[in-house]
Amino acid sequence: MSTERMRRVNEALRHVLAEGVEELADPAIGFVTVTSVKAANDFSQAEVFVTVLGGPTRRERALRGLERAHGVLQRRVARELHLRRTPQLVFQYDAGVDRAMRITELLENGQPSGGSDAGDGSPP
């Protein structure tokens, strides 16, 4: 399958799943954002990457809630996308957002507060 088609399918999966997650009534899931989806070429499986507002305990509870709801979400994918095969959903925490926030924090804390004018004759 072409790379462009896979990109479009992954984006369509992400869109359908994001809407589906918003409509779930399970309070354990809380505030979850579907950041990306990566389906296998044969559609046997799709990794669904999510971020969760809160700490590690909240994250684990949300991922367990998503696993409980995977059947509902898979049916929604089958109903809305009409794929040759509906992939088995596997939910993963997307640590990329945490890494980006940590890098931003390090960059902000590593910058001198007074700017680059040190006044000692050294280059900025």
Image (tube, rainbow, N blue to C red):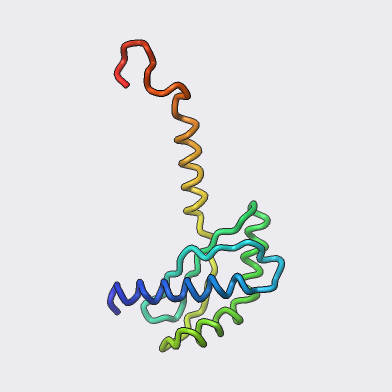
User: Please, is residue 67 above or below residue 79 in the view?
Assistant: above
Residue shown at 46% from the left, 47% from the top: 100
x%, y% of residue 105? 50, 38
x%, y% of residue 89? 52, 75
Q: Looking at the image, which is closer to me, 53 or 38?
A: 53
x%, y% of residue 6? 35, 75
Residue shown at 45% from the left, 35% from the top: 107
User: Please, is residue 17 above or below residue 117 in the view?
Assistant: below
Q: On the image, which quarter does residue 114 sit in? A: top left
x%, y% of residue 37? 45, 69
Residue shown at 28% from the left, 76% from the top: 2
Left or right of residue 54: residue 48: left
Outermost residue on the top side: it is: 120
Left or right of residue 1: residue 68: right
Residue shown at 55% from the left, 81% from the top: 74
Q: Looking at the image, which is closer to me, 76 or 57?
A: 76
Outermost residue on the right side: it is: 27
Quarter in which the N terminus is drawn: bottom left
Left or right of residue 95: residue 4: left
